[in-house]
Image (cartoon, rainbow, N blue to C red):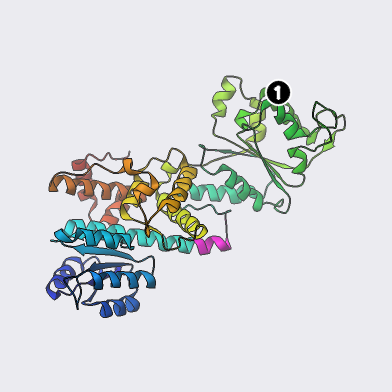
């Protein structure tokens, strides 16, 4: 089925022209005034609306069109409303954007530009629907709030399910900010130890002279300041899971003690003589290249093989580009609800900037930027300024030819990303043949993946 597009314009000739140009791609529904537009919107529930602000009874004023926009968004806050505005009406279009419109296109309408805007609007609308469906699915079958539709994350979920039912040690690898602790918590929550404690310790965040006591505990008087007996993190994880984050930062002497514990499942507190039996499952994580650390004798090979019975690698956010928009919507909903900004959405430029940004800080950076943006946003939409991502915008084209090539390049690159580099899927999404897509990629200088 073709997606439904509602066109609202009081000029019957313009409506007919637009319908003729767009009917191959969309199921076009038309309206000539506010009352008819609202009736058609409630009947057909289109994801996208193309709206001219000049509607009767005052077609020279934007008031009726802005009222229509407001009522549509009140009816369905996720509706994508694209404003059609004349050259002298840019201020009205920007006012509409501030009130929740998705984007605008100028008159006379350039059909290539309009089709690109509509495709992106329908794509984002579908992402938001997918996110809502995934939310419902995750409520029934949650991975500790971890979202991801990309092949890399689906493989992570498969491995979580596979290893959770065992007591095998798991080494979680990944760059900082990829969610290694969330994966460890997911493994714990799906294991037979789920009712036991989940105890996490960051081996790189505790001073070297304190980490031994933190891990193994100490007896009263073991050192200056040890005024009472204190169990360590290993001991407090009894019958549960111990998560050793940034294990690659663990000092060499403690690597020996940890290895002995993993072999014997027994510990001695600092300053103590009693051997204490501890039943815990150990999960570890690091962003350090442990094989290189072993080659330079900074990490023990025997400890590595004790910890890495199963190795689970988390992909960087740039490697799962198809998840970026999904995660962005999730964080926006969470923080908008927390700060009572429930009507917030991303504007079109913000979503383009989010998809272009390389995200060196991974999911943590994305989360923090969106949290800040929700706090800083003035209107109903989060902008590139709110995200502090202005520098990711492509330079403005100076000629119509450059603008068209810039738009084509963006559409092709995003389609290839969403389809994992597969030409057939990208061509189908763009509505062109494989040979045509190959020709377009060559013309635009887009490198083919081997």
Which residue ends up furthest to the right in the rendered image? 274
User: Is residue 419 in view?
Assistant: no
Q: Position of residue 137 (x, y in %)?
A: 52, 62
Question: Magenta stretch: dominant SS?
Answer: helix
| Dot 1 alpha-carbon crowd within 10 angstroms: few under 14, some 14 to 19, many 20 or more | few
Q: Position of residue 339 (x, y in %)?
A: 50, 57
Q: Is residue 216 left or right of residue 52?
A: right
Q: Is residue 45 left or right of residue 199?
A: left
Residue drawn at (47%, 50%), measured in percent from left and top? Answer: 371
Q: Which residues are magenta?
A: 135-142
Answer whether residue 359 is magenta in the image.
Answer: no
Please state, as top left, top right, bottom left or bottom right, where the N terminus lies in the image: bottom left
Q: Is residue 9 left or right of residue 3?
A: left
Q: Name the residue nearer the viewer: 9 or 434.
A: 9
User: Is residue 230 in view?
Assistant: yes
Q: Position of residue 29 (x, y in %)?
A: 25, 74
Q: Name the residue nearer the viewer: 337 or 255.
A: 337
Q: From the viewer's perspective, is residue 254 above or below residue 116?
A: above
The secondary structure type at the circle numbered 1 is helix
Number of numbered discs visible in the structure rendering: 1
Q: Is residue 370 left or right of residue 5?
A: right
Residue drawn at (24%, 41%), measured in percent from left and top? Answer: 395
Q: Name the residue nearer the viewer: 262 or 178.
A: 178
Q: Which residue is mark 1?
A: 253
Residue 326: name its quadrant: bottom left
Q: From the viewer's perspective, is residue 24 above or below residue 294?
A: below
Residue drawn at (70%, 30%), measured in percent from left and top? Answer: 211
Please state, as top left, top right, bottom left or bottom right, where the C terminus lies in the image: top left
Q: Position of residue 314 (x, y in %)?
A: 51, 42
Q: From the viewer's perspective, is residue 418 above or below residue 69?
A: above
């Amino acid at each position: 089925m073709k997606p439904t597009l509602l066109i609202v314009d009081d000029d019957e000739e313009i409506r007919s022209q637009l319908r003729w140009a767009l009917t191959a791609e969309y199921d076009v529904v038309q309206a000539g005034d506010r009352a008819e537009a609202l009736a058609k919107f409630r009947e057909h529930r289109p994801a996208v609306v193309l709206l001219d602000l000049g509607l009767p009874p005052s077609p020279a004023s934007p008031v009726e069109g802005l009222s229509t926009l407001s009522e549509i968004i009140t009816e369905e806050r996720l509706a994508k409303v694209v404003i059609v505005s004349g050259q002298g009406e840019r201020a009205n279009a920007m006012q509409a954007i501030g009130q929740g419109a998705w984007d605008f296109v100028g008159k006379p309408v350039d059909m290539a530009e309009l089709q690109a805007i509509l495709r992106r609007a329908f794509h984002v609308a579908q992402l938001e629907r997918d996110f809502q469906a995934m939310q419902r699915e995750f409520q029934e079958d949650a991975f500790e709030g971890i979202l991801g539709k990309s092949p890399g994350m689906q493989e992570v979920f498969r491995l979580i399910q596979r290893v959770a039912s065992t007591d095998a040690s798991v080494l979680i690898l990944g760059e900082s900010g990829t969610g290694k602790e969330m994966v460890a918590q997911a493994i714990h929550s799906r294991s037979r130890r789920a009712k036991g404690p989940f105890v996490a310790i960051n081996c790189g965040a505790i001073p070297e002279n304190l980490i031994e006591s933190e891990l193994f505990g100490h007896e009263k008087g073991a050192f200056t300041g040890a005024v009472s007996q204190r169990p360590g993190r290993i001991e407090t994880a009894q019958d549960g899971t111990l998560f050793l984050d940034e294990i690659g930062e663990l000092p060499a002497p403690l690597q020996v003690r940890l290895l002995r514990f993993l072999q014997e499942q027994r510990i001695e507190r600092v300053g103590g003589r009693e051997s204490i039996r501890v039943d815990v499952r150990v999960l570890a994580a690091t962003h350090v290249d442990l094989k290189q650390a072993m080659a330079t004798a900074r990490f023990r090979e025997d400890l590595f093989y004790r910890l890495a019975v199963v190795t689970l690698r988390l992909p960087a956010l740039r490697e799962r580009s198809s998840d970026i928009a999904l995660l962005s919507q999730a964080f926006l909903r969470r923080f908008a609800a927390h700060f009572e900004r429930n009507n917030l959405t991303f504007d079109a430029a913000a979503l383009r900037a989010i998809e272009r940004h390389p995200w060196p800080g991974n999911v943590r950076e994305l989360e923090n930027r969106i949290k800040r943006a929700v706090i800083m946003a003035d209107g109903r939409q989060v902008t590139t300024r709110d995200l502090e991502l202005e520098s990711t915008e492509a330079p403005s084209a100076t000629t119509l030819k450059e603008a068209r090539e810039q738009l084509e390049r963006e559409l092709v690159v995003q389609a290839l990303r969403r389809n994992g580099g597969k030409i057939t899927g990208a061509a189908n999404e763009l509505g062109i043949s494989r040979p045509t897509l190959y020709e377009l990629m060559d013309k635009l200088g887009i490198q083919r993946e081997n």
